[in-house]
Image: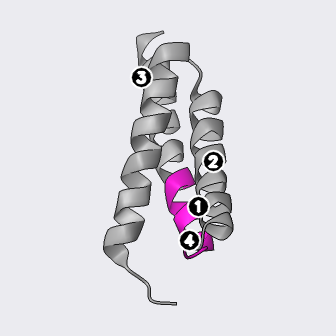
Amino acid sequence: MQLSMNDKVDHFVVGLILGGLTGILTGSPMLAIIVALVAGIFKEVYDNLYGGDVELLDAISTTAGGLVSGGLLKFIQYMGS
């Protein structure tokens, strides 16, 4: 297994974007995190089924992006109330 930081950053950014869009559209920080988590897991399942490299850190990186976007949304909601 070769650890590519660029790949992990890509996964983080995808999680950040998916979580951010979900959070903006629904107003739910928790749903933003869940969507990023599910996307990360599904991507690794896809990799497993179609010959890609399955890496737990990829799913964790995607979820981390969702955590950041969910946390930011929660902070914005808190500051606005």
Q: Residues within 10 Å of mark 4 (few under 14, many from 20)?
A: some
Q: Earlier in the sequence, mark 3 or mark 1?
A: 1
Report helix, strand or loop for mark 2: helix
Q: In the image, residue 56 lies at what x, y percent?
A: 62, 71
Q: Residues within 10 Å of mark 1 (few under 14, many from 20)?
A: many
Compute the Cα span from label 3 to label 4: 28 Å
Q: Are marks 4 and 1 in contact (CB under 8 Å)?
A: yes
Q: Which residues are magenta?
A: 52-63
Compute the Cα span from label 1 to label 2: 7 Å
- Residue 63 vs 8, above or below: the answer is above
Compute the Cα span from label 3 to label 2: 21 Å
> Label 3 sits on what residue type?
Ile
Pointer 3: what residue? 76
Q: Which mark is residue 37?
A: 2
| Residue in view at x 56 percent, y 71 percent | 57
Residue 35 sits in which quadrant? top right
